[in-house]
Amino acid sequence: MTSENVFDPASAWLPPGDAPLVGDELRALLKQAFAIEEGGPSPAAVALEVGPSALSEAAKAALAAAVGGASEQVVEDGAARAAHANGMSYLDLVRRSAQPPRVPDAIVLPASHDEVGAVLRACAEHGVAVVPFGGGTSVVGGVAPEPGGFAAVIALDLARLDQLVEVDEISWTATLEAGVTGPRAEELLAARGFTLGHVPQSFERATIGGYAATRSSGQLSTGWGRFDALVERVRVATPVGDLDLGRAPGSAAGPDLKQLVLGSEGAFGVVTSVTVRVRPTPEVRRHEGWRVADLAAGVEVLRTLAQRGPRPDLARLSDEVETAMGVATGGGGEDHAGGCLVLVGWEGFADDVERRATAATAILEAAGAVPLGEQAAESWRHGRFRAPRLRDELLGAGLLIETLETATSWRELHNLHARVGDVLREALDGSSPLVACHVSHLYAAGASLYFTVLARRDADDPVGQWTRAKAAVMDALAAAGATLTHHHAVGADHAPWLAAEDGELGVELLRAVKDRVDPAGILNPGKLLPLK
C-alpha cells in the first residue's frame, strides 16, 4: 500500500460546499482587529498523507476473527484512517498542516460487547494499541492515535453499537449502547415518551460512550445533572474481563467503582453500554435572556439561584467581552446596551416550570436584571451549534481560536476569572488577544468558568504559540487550586498536570488500576495518565 493524500470531511464541522458563516464584512473587520495581513485555507481542510498500515497479517486476521470473521469491519483505506486521525481541538486542526498527525493503522468496527472484548484480547496478544472512538469530538487529544511504544494502533469505532436496549418506564431509566449519538438517543427515547436531555456543544456528533468516558456536561446540567450523575449502570469491556457496575440508585457496598470507570477515557476499558436516568418529554421548555449591569451582579444572581433556589435547569452568564461578541456575531439576541447577558431556562412539567420560573423572575428583578425575552435565548441556542463551524472558518482567516474551562468555588470565582484572563493576554502578547468567558454549570459551592480565546495566529509556530499559552493557564489553575478541567476531560493535553489535582499517590493509584485491567498497556496510551 502506497501513501496517499486524503481530505477528511469529518475533521471539520463545516464540510466543503456548505454556505460560509463568515461574510466579507466580518472577515475584513477581523483582519483589522487582529492585524492579520492575509488568511488562507482553514487547517481543517488540509489533506493528510496516509501511509501503509503497520498491522501485521497475523493481527489483521485476529481482528477480523474478533468481529465475527467479517474482514470488511477491519478497514484500512485512507479515507477511513484519516477520519480517525484526530479530535476537534485547535491543536488537532493546526497540526494537520504544521505537524501532520499519525493516522491509525486500521479502523475496527465491532457490533457487540462481546466483539469489543474479543478485539481487546486480540490487540493485547498481538501488541496493538487501541483508541476507542465515538464521535471524535475530543478537544484535549483524547482520540489521538498514539501507539504508546507499540508498532501499530487501531481506532476502535463503536458506531455499530447503536441500539436503545431497554426503557424502564416505571423507574425512568434507559439502557443505550455506547455508539448512539446524542441526536439519535433523543430520537429513540422520544418514541417512548422520554428524553435524556444531555446537550453538550458537541451534541451533533458526540456519543453515549463518549459522554460516559469523559464525564460530560450539557446545557441543562445545572438542573438535570452532569452525565456521570445520570448514570445508573455501566458495562465495560477490558482485555482481562468485563466490568458490570451499578446495581441500585444508591449503595453503601464499598467505593463506587462505577465512578472510577466514568471519566477514565478508555484507559481502563471500553464502555459498551450505559443505563441512564431519563425524564418524560418536557411539557414545557422555557428559556429566556436577561441583562445585568456587570459580571459581579450576574454572579450574585446565579449564586442565589444555585444556593437558595429555585435552581434553573439552564444557567449561563456571559462576561462583558463574551456578551459583546455575542451581539456582534448574532449569538445573543438584540443589542444589550452593555452589561452582561444571563440565560436561564426550565424544562419539565408545566406546573413545575411555572413555579420555578416565577420564583427566579422575582430574584432576577430584585437584582435589577432587565428581561430580554425568549428570543435572546433562542439566538444563543442557534449560535451555540454554529460556533464549531464558525471556528473552522475563522481559522482560515488567520486566527487562533480555542476554548478552555475550569471550575472553582464562588469565593474564588472572580479572582480566577481575572487571573486566567491576565495569563492568556500575557502569554499571547503581541498577537492582539481577545479573551471572553462565561459562568455556567452551577453548584451550591461554585461554578464552571469557560474561556474563549481569539488571537492572531503565529504562522511560523501555531502549535507552540498555543501550547505555551495553555501550559501557562494550566499552571495558574493548579496554583489557584481550581480543577484542571470541568468537562473537557484530561486526554493527552491535560495529563501532565493530573498529579497537581490528584496528588502523586492518587496518580499511582490510577496506574495500579490500569495495570490490573490493562496489563499489556494497549488501552488509549498517553490519555488520562502520562506515558511512562
Image: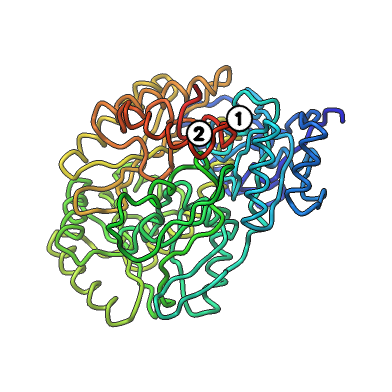
Mark 2 or mark 1: whose residue is earlier in sequence:
1
Q: Can see residue 251?
A: yes
Residue 101 against residue 139 in the figure, above or below: above
- Mark 1 lies on a secondary structure that is loop
Q: Amino acid at mark 1?
A: Glu
Corner quadrant of residue 410 = top left
Tell me the amino acid under the disc marked 2. Answer: Lys
- The one of 47 and 248 positioned closer to us in this rendering: 248
What SS does tag 2 mark? loop
**Place of residue 223 in the rendered image (x, y in percent of width and height, measured from the top left):** 30, 63
Q: Which residue is mark 2?
A: 527
Q: Residue at x 75, y 43 (%)?
A: 63
Q: Residues within 10 Å of mark 2 (few under 14, many from 20)?
A: many
Q: Is residue 335 left or right of residue 162?
A: left
User: Horizontal and vertical percent for residue 181?
Assistant: 57, 59
Rendered residue at 24%/35% (across/down): 416
Camera-nearest residue between 475 and 172? 172
Foreground of the two, 77 or 62: 62
Query: Residue 496, percent across and down?
Result: 42, 25
Direction top: furthest residue: 460
Residue at horizontal 51%, vertical 56%?
235
Residue at 47% from the left image edge and 52% from the top image edge: 212
Would you say 269 lies left or right of 258 here?
Answer: right
| Residue nearest the observer in this picture, 120 or 264 | 120
Considering the image in quadrants, where does the N terminus appear? top right
Q: Are marks 2 and 1 in contact (CB under 8 Å)?
A: yes
Label of residue 146 in the image: 1
